[in-house]
Image: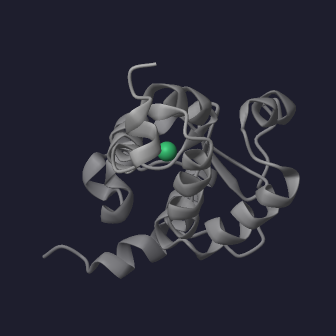
Amino acid sequence: MPAPKDECIESVLPAKDSGNLVDDNIDVNSIKAQVPVSLAKLQQFKEATAADETLQTLKNTVLIVWPFDRSSVPLNILQYWNYRDGISAINGHLYKSQRLMVPINLKKEMLNKLQDAHLGIVKTQTIAQGLLVGPKMNKDIEDFIGQCAVCSKYRNL
Ligand SMILES: [Zn+2]
C-alpha cells in the first residue's frame, strides 16, 4: 500500500534552518542580472516562495537530493522531475536554470505587470525570459495578453 502523500513529503523534509540554502556552484549575481525583478520585489518573492507549498517541497527536495526513483518524488513536484538537474535553491528563491520561479501568489501580479507595457505576446515573452511563471508560461502569457484590447491592436507590430 502506498504511503499517504503527506508522509512522502515529510520523509524528504530537512530539519528547519539547516543553513544549507546557498549552492556555491552558482553565481548569484549573474542570475540576478537576468531576472527582471527589483530587490524589494525579490524579498516579496522570498516570502511568497516560503508560503507556496509546492515550491517549499521543491526547495526541500533540491536542498537534500532528488529521490533516485521517479515514483518516490512527492506528487506535487512530479512536474519538475524531468528538468530537476536545472533547478536550484538560492537564498530562499528557486531557479530553473537562470529563471526565477514565480510563486503562485505572485503569478497574477507578475502577469499584470508584464501586461502593463502592452508589448504584445512575443515581446512580453522575451522580457519574461528571466522568470518562470509556471510550466506553461508562454501559453499563460499568450492567453493573458490575448485578452488585452490594446495588445491585440498592435499584435502584428
Ligand atoms: Zn496589453
- Quick one: 26 or 157, which is closer to the camera? 157
* Image height of 93 relative to 46, above or below: above
* Image height of 92 relative to 22, above or below: below
Q: Residue at x 47, y 48 (%)?
A: 66
> Picture quarter containing residue 9?
bottom left
Residue 97 visible at all: no
Q: Residue at x 86, y 52 (%)?
A: 39
Rendered location of residue 11, percent (x, y): 46, 71
Outermost left residue: 1
- Quick one: 80 or 37, which is closer to the camera? 37
Rendered location of residue 85, percent (x, y): 50, 33
Rendered location of residue 62, percent (x, y): 57, 50
Q: Is residue 67 left or right of residue 104?
A: left
Outermost top residue: 157
Residue 29 visible at all: yes
> Picture quarter containing residue 45?
bottom right
Q: Residue at x 46, y 19 (%)?
A: 157
- Quick one: 31 or 66, which is closer to the camera? 31
> Picture quarter containing residue 20?
bottom right
Q: Residue at x 18, y 73 (%)?
A: 2
Q: Is residue 19 left or right of residue 124?
A: right
Quarter of the figure that contains the N terminus: bottom left
Rendered location of residue 24, percent (x, y): 81, 36
